[in-house]
Image (cartoon, grey):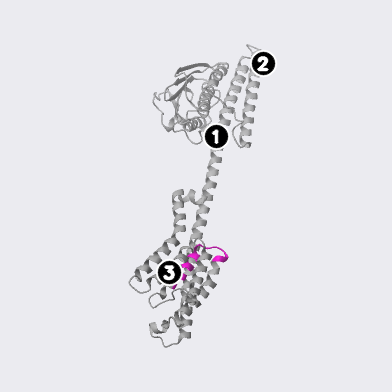
Amino acid sequence: MEASSRVIGRRTGLVLAAVRQLVAPLAGATYLLLWILAEGGRDRLLENIELFSFFAVAIGLSVWTPRVAMGLVLATGFLQALDLLQPPQETTWATSAAMAYVALFVGAFARGLTRWLAVPVLAVAAVTFGWVTTVPTAAWPDRWGSWVASESGVRQDAILLSLSAFAVGVLAWLLGLGIGWILGRVRLDVERVGTALDRAGLDLRLAEDRARISRDVHDSLAHSLAVIVSQAQGAAALEAVRPGVAADALTTVGDVARTALVDVRMLVERIQADSDETAPAASLGDVPALVDRMRGLGMSVDLAVSGESELDLTEAQQVAVYRIVQESLTNALKHGGSDSRVRVGLEAEASGLKVEVASEGRRPLVARDGRGIGIEGMKERARLAGGWLRAVPIGRGSGAGAGAGAGAGATADAAPGRFVVTAFVPSTGLGLAAGAQDA
């Protein structure tokens, strides 16, 4: 039922289950109503209604309790043979077709031994039907032979009717088997599709988790390595003039490397653990410390915070903002150099937080090596936080609004010069993606 609900919908699944449970009772009620209407103007209606009711109840129970239904069919025939129930008449002998309806539902919906038990029950019921329909008694001298003016004799008529009734019942049972096979195949297909959806959902969650971890590894290591490269180059350049600068640079490199190792260790623990409880949780309060570290590398970084004093951002949204600022500063260091100028603006509004990081530098630490993933990672973080991000190169003939589309981010990681990253994260959490808690 769970797999069916996932594939066809819970409401549709409930409707189909209700139809399965109600089809036999509705068929029994229809059977009873039609026979009452058919015999309404004839004698012995009350006695016939009793017979109709026995068969209608048997049909109605054939899905819920198939063994009870088959027992009622047999009991009805035996009671007719004992003259305790209205026997078949010239206009009511066809009521025994109820055994075929019961066989149909048992073949379609019953399971195991109960389904196959319908065959011997049909045989006994057919013989009983042939007996009570053809053999005259003192109370009912007119039987099948007189109705159809048969000259074959009672024995031959009884055999013929018994075989005919059994054949009709078996055909109905076989039809039920076919219906049950089709329903079983459909059920298996639905379960197979449900399993495939579960597997696809698991693969998607794993892919999202890998992408999330990849972004975290990139943000942590890219920032740390950029700092290490900056310190190493600075120490090498100043060693001849300021011999003591190498020791300071090595101290900074050691501190940054230790921090990177801790970050990587925490990320590995996140991979091995069932939850993200061990993950470091950065926040907006960590942005000033991040800015101070970048200033210590020689960068000119201004931090401007304005707007609402209290801003309602979730923990995941604060992590996203921190990572966006961190990646923007790292890109400024890599592609603008340690003497680049950066302005970080955080403007809190009633609707959310606006982030703007404008950088300018002409001495990149690393050469352009193709398209990076930093800008795309920042865009994804902003999207998961419910907002958006644009990265736009400015100057060098591009204009302030140039590159605002998809192409802007393609060269953002490697283009020296002036660059602006603008992002917005809503404070209400509206539109927050399902994976935002893992940002």
Please state which of residues 407 and 187 is positioned toward the viewer in this rendering: 187
Circle nearer the viewer, 1 or 3: 3
Disc marking residue 50: 3
Q: Give the range drawn in magenta.
A: 96-114
Residue 40's place in the image compared with 316, above or below, is below
Mark 3 neighbour density, 10 Å: few (under 14) some (14–19) many (20 or more) = few
Residue 102's place in the image compared with 338, above or below, is below
Query: Magenta span has 380?
Result: no
Identity of the residue furthest to the left in this view:
41
Q: Mark 2 points at which residue?
A: 247
Q: Residue at x 42, y 82 (%)?
A: 144
Q: Position of residue 261 (x, y in %)?
A: 64, 27
Residue 190's place in the image compared with 51, above or below, is above
Q: From the viewer's perspective, is 348 left or right of 275?
A: left
Q: Which residue is drawn at 41% across and 31% down?
A: 405
- The part of the image, by quadrant, that contains residue 207 is top right
What's the residue type where badge 2 is placed? Ala
Secondary structure, mark 1, is helix
Please state which of residues 293 and 382 is positioned toward the viewer in this rendering: 382
- The part of the image, by quadrant, that contains residue 88 is bottom left
Disc marking residue 212: 1
Mark 1 neighbour density, 10 Å: few (under 14) some (14–19) many (20 or more) = some
Label 2 to label 1: alpha-carbon separation: 36 Å
What's the residue type where badge 3 is placed? Glu
What's the residue type where badge 1 is placed? Arg
Please state which of residues 110 and 129 is positioned toward the viewer in this rendering: 129
Residue 37's place in the image compared with 370, above or below, is below
Secondary structure, mark 3, is helix
Mark 2 neighbour density, 10 Å: few (under 14) some (14–19) many (20 or more) = few
Secondary structure, mark 2, is helix
Mark 3 / mark 2, whichever is N-terminal: 3
